[in-house]
Image (cartoon, rainbow, N blue to C red):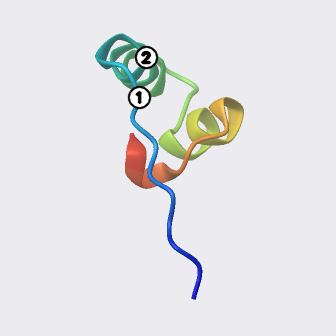
Amino acid sequence: MAKRKYYSYKEEFRGEAVKRANQPGYTVASVVKELGIGNLNL
């Protein structure tokens, strides 16, 4: 079994992603897809 790789994102990056997800017309799913990150990271 392959070892899972974990990514660490800077607080600023996460904050901006959350702000974007909270804007009208955006969903968490659309933001994580756009940023190329997993939905559990947001």
**Left/right of residue 8 with respect to residue 2 in the rendered view:** left
Q: Which residue is labeled 1 in the image?
A: 9
Q: Which mark is residue 23?
A: none
* Circle count: 2
Kindly identify the residue that appears in the image at 42 percent across and 13 percent down: 16
Which of the 4 image quarters holds residue 1? bottom right
User: Given the image, on which type of amino acid does mark 2 rest?
Assistant: Phe
> Is label 2 in a helix, a strand or a loop?
helix
Relative to 2, say whether 17 is above or below.
above
Relative to 5, say whether 36 is above or below.
above
Q: Nearer the viewer, residue 18 or 38?
A: 38
In which quadrant is the C terminus drawn? top left
Q: Badges 2 and 1: C-beta atoms under 8 Å apart?
A: yes
Q: Specify few, some or many for label 1: CA neighbours under 10 Å numbering under 14, 14-19, or 20 or more.
A: few
Kindly identify the residue that appears in the image at 45 percent across and 27 percent down: 21
Q: Which residue is labeled 2 in the image?
A: 13
Kindly identify the residue that appears in the image at 63 percent across and 39 percent down: 30
Position of residue 14 measured from the top left corner of the image (x, y, whole percent): 37, 23
